[in-house]
Amino acid sequence: MDNALLALAGAIVAVTGTLLAPILSQRVLARVQTEQFERQQRAADAQWVREQRTAEVEKRQACYVTANSGYRRYRIELMKYLWLVHKGEATAQARADLEEARHSMHTAFAEAQMVASDAVLRELDAMTATLAGAYSRTLHLEEGDPYPGWAFEEIQAELLRLGDRWKRMRGLMRADLGVEPRPVGS
């Protein structure tokens, strides 16, 4: 009888194992597939985040290029116009060139206000204020009604000092984009 019970118990275990094997293997397979799907989802999410960061940096870079060239062009046109005012040779075309450069700078500034980092934006704000002041003083000088203490030489000196500020602004833009500073002399 012991052998019969032992055989019956073995048969029950074998039948139970045979019946449960597909269920257990299906659960294990489902768990493996779920884990694999979650891994793939995490990898896809990480890839999306990387692509978004890259797109953001590219957008800031394009904005900084536009701002840098717009501000530079406006400063150069303002310096040229100041020189023409000083010589008494300001023309309507020179004024139109100045206004076009001024509007380009304002457009670049408007874009930068939406994209630039706070540090870069503070620097652009300061440069905009300085350029606006120089523009206003230049127009008053042209009209023969200069601001006290702001003759040609003072306005010119202020515009030339913007060159140093330019380097600081460019450094902030490069740092914001993650560009390493270059060693001196390279």
Image (cartoon, grey):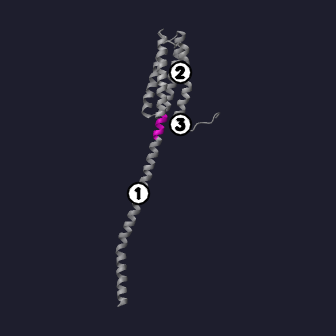
Label 2: which residue?
76
Q: Which type of secondary structure does the marked residue at label 2 adopt?
A: helix
Q: Residue at x 41, y 53 (%)?
A: 41
Q: CA distance from mark 2 to mark 3?
A: 25 Å
Magenta stretch: includes residue 163: no
Count neighbours of disc 1 (C-alpha within 10 A) and say few if under 14, some if 14 to 19, many if 20 or more: few
Q: CA distance from mark 3 to mark 1?
A: 38 Å
Label 1: which residue?
37
Q: Amino acid at mark 3?
A: Ala
Asked if residue 91 can be seen in this view, the reply is no
Magenta region, mostly helix, strand or loop? helix
Q: Residue at x 37, y 69 (%)?
A: 24
Taking 141 as reference, is 5 above or below it? Answer: below
Q: Nearer the viewer, mark 2 or mark 3?
A: 3
Q: Residue at x 56, y 18 (%)?
A: 157
What segment carries the magenta color? Answer: 55-62
Q: Nearer the viewer, residue 82 or 160?
A: 160
Q: Amino acid at mark 1?
A: Phe
User: Where in the figure is residue 138, as x and y percent of width and height?
Assistant: 49, 15
Count neighbours of disc 3 (C-alpha within 10 A) and say few if under 14, some if 14 to 19, many if 20 or more: few
Q: Amino acid at mark 2?
A: Ile
